[in-house]
Every structure is written in C-alpha cells, then in structure tokens.
Amino acid sequence: MFLSCMVGVLLLSHYSSTKPVEVYSALTDSLSSDVVLNNLPSLQLQIFGDHLYYFGAIYEGNYFRAMQFCNYHGMQLVSIESKEENDFLWKYLQTFLGRRGYWFWASGTVLADDHWVWMSTGRPILFTNWIKNQPDNFGNNEKCLEARYSYESLMWNDAVCTAARYAICETTTPKRVSKMTSNSSMTTIIVTPQ
Ligand SMILES: [Ca+2]
Ligand SMILES: [Ca+2]
C-alpha cells in the first residue's frame, strides 16, 4: 500500500474555520497504521526537529489566554528549552517580521513557587536568555515569561501576567516529520517512523 511506509499524513487547511483537534494523540494511538487526518486547525505550522510551532501574530491576550489559545488548537504555549530552539524562533521571526518588534508569551512562570518553570512541560527553566538585569520582578508583580523579538535577538523578560502579548504555540510530533509541502491552500506533513 502506498502509504504503508508512513505513519501519518496530516492535511492542514490554512484558511478553513478553526476547530479543536486531537491530532497528535490520534497519531500516537495509530502508529502501526496509516492515518489521514483532514480536520486540523487552520494553522500554518513551522517545523524544528520533531516539534511544530504556530506563530500567533494575530492573537494577543494575557498569559492564561495565550495558554488557552494554544490548548484550544491541540498545542501548548511554547517552552524554549535550548539555545538552538531560541535561535530557531528568532531566525524564523526575522523572516516573518523583519524589523518590527514583537513580544510574545512563552510558558515560563514563577507563579507556582519561587522557581521558574515551563508550565507546558513541567520542567524547570535551565537554559535562559534573559535581558540584562532581568528577571527583576518589577513591582513584585512580574511572574510570567515574555520573549521579546527584535531583529538583533530574541531575549526574555519577566512581565505582568495580565499584559497583552502574542502567543507562540508548540507541539511535539510522536514521530519525526520527514517532509512538508505547501501550496496556497494546503500544507501536507508526512510523518515517518524513526
Ligand atoms: Ca520547546
Ligand atoms: Ca521584568
């Protein structure tokens, strides 16, 4: 069978109405069979390794709304856990935004206790890329992590969680994405076994 070598083929319609989906759990449950899914949200995703990212340049909301927004689309608010991942986001944003400034929520927070954690992964924040003199917990009220894009860098600040920021969402694919093709209306992602 043509698709027998593939774990799944994801068909993404960029401009159809958005709807919550369970794409990745469906893939996980179906590793031994072919999966064709055509009910993905209308998100144009970017790939880095075995992670997929959505750059929510049209959405602004507080930290919790940003989490909700990503969860609604079957994703999580981004966790930036390495220099490589930070560089990927920065370089992509350069092509996307050029010299426009852009601040977005990542899932880092110190709300739970005095330690910074990535809420989306539950892991402590080990790699950091704070702006100089940050985090400063200004006004004893800055508990959430924003990443500030500029053409020169993507660096972090602790900010008031209720501030309006854009969102970047992330999810992992259960198996490596081997190929992605795009045209004006459709993106096809082919996932193969590792
Ligand atoms: Ca990540
Ligand atoms: Ca701060």
Image (cartoon, helix red, strand yellow):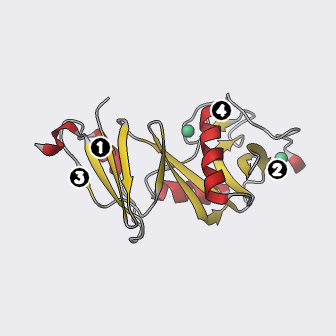
Q: In the rendered structure, which amino acid carries the disc numbered 2?
A: Asn
Q: Using the numbered discs, state the Cα–Cα distance from disc 1 to disc 3 in whole angstroms.
A: 9 Å
Identify which amino acid the numbered label 3 is placed on: Val
Whole-number angstrom distance, CA of label 3 to CA of label 4: 34 Å
Q: Is residue 159 above or below residue 115?
A: below
The residue that mark 3 highlights is 36
Residue 18 visible in the displayed image: yes
Mark 2 CB within 8 Å of ligand 2: no
Q: Is residue 59 left or right of residue 102?
A: left
Tell us which disc is closer to us: 2 or 4: 4
- The residue where tag 2 is placed is 141
Give, as a three-letter code, the residue at label 1.
Leu
Q: Earlier in the sequence, mark 1 or mark 4?
A: 1
Which residue lies under the disc numbered 4?
83
Which labelled disc corresponds to residue 73? none
Closest to the observer: 9 or 18?
9
Circle 4 Cα neighbour tier, 10 Å, few/some/many (<14 / 14–19 / ≥20): few
**For residue 43, what is the image quadrant?**
bottom left
Q: Position of residue 140 (x, y in %)?
A: 86, 47
Give me the residue at 75% from left, 58% from top.
Answer: 101
Residue pictured at 67% horizontal, 32% vertical: 125
Among numbered discs 1 and 3, the one appearing first in the sequence: 1
- Say the numbered circle drawn on residue 27: 1
Spatial distance from mark 1 to mark 4, Cα to Cα? 29 Å
Q: Is residue 170 left or right of residue 98?
A: left
Lower position in the chain sequence, tag 2 or tag 3: 3
Query: Of the residues under marks 2 and 4, which one precedes in the sequence?
Result: 4
